[in-house]
Image (tube, helix red, strand yellow):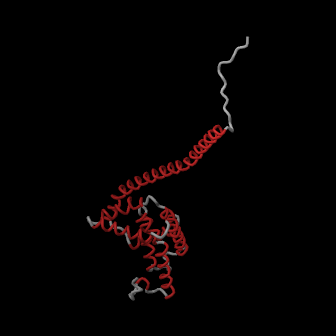
Amino acid sequence: MLRNSGQEVVIDAELTTSERSQIDAFSCFLLQYLHPAVLHTFWTDDLNYSTLTHHWFSSRLSFPYNLYYLEKRRKRAQRFLSDRTINSIMKDGLQTLNMLSAKLGDSKFFCGNKPSSLDALVFGYLAPLLRLPLPNDRLQLHLRACPNLVRFVEQVASIYLPPTEEQLRLQKADRKMWEMRLQKAEKAKEAEKVATAEANQVQEDLPLRDAILFGLGAITLSLIFAIHSGIIQVVVEDEEQTIPE
């Protein structure tokens, strides 16, 4: 964005014109394919939102601004993703992680041995995705299965964002709380799966029940019609039979 506005990005100063063009192309690619998946993961996935996003922002923003901000931000994310299905969003996100892993390879950074604005952009997407506790963690699990991307995030964080002693203390204090929230969310997720499976089983049983009832009804009506029309005759014999002498 700074480069497009005519300002020089210091970390990109030594890059060639071709490399800068590649960074612009990758930035657009990430915005189109990875950004929606990350947006869904944190803002429109109900379980992740209630477990992590809502609690985190609510505890750090003052009341009532936190309510306004959360509502506005979530609705904006929902509008942004409204014309796409969750499956297509996640598929694009997973494929983009594969592409980033292939692009990085064994290199330290995405443009060689020195960081660039692309590294900062990728880190901004991947660090929260890798480190935050997510009940619905499909994208997170895929990221963790890409060891070079995990190494990249940990490396950038340790070099450029080393935590202070106070931050480490707060992280340790918060860890138990986040673990409890994650466990609670996992239980809710499992209960939802069971309820969904039971509902699906009921829906599968209903057609069979209806078919049996329909068949019994059809047979009954056919018998009534046959008897009424004389096709089937019912002969009633006198129970008192004459005993021969």
Give percent across and percent down for residue 129: 44, 66
Q: Which residue: 56% across, 45% down?
A: 209
Q: Residue at point 37% right, 63% down?
A: 53
Instruction: Tell me: residue 51, above or below residue 37.
Output: above
Determine whether, in the image, residue 19 is placed left or right of residue 180: right
* Rendered image quadrant of residue 212: top right
Q: Position of residue 176 (x, y in %)?
A: 36, 55
Where, by quadrant of the figure, is residue 162 drawn?
bottom left
> Left or right of 193: which side holds 66?
left
The tally of labels here is 0
Q: Which residue lies furthest to the left in this view?
A: 63
List the single residue furthest toward the right.
Answer: 245
Give the quadrant of the N terminus. bottom left
Q: Report the front residue among 223 and 245.
A: 245
The residue that appears at 43% across and 68% down in the rendered structure is 39
Q: Where is residue 41 in the image (x, y as percent from the top left)?
A: 44, 65
Q: Quick one: quadrant of the C terminus? A: top right
Please name whichever residue, 244 or 125, is drawn nearer the observer in this view of the structure: 244
Decide which of 112, 212 is in the foreground and name it: 212
Q: Is residue 187 above or below residue 137?
A: above
Q: Nearer the viewer, residue 217 or 239?
A: 239
- From this view, report whether residue 231 is shown above or below residue 38: above
Among all residues in the image, which is located at the extreme top? 245
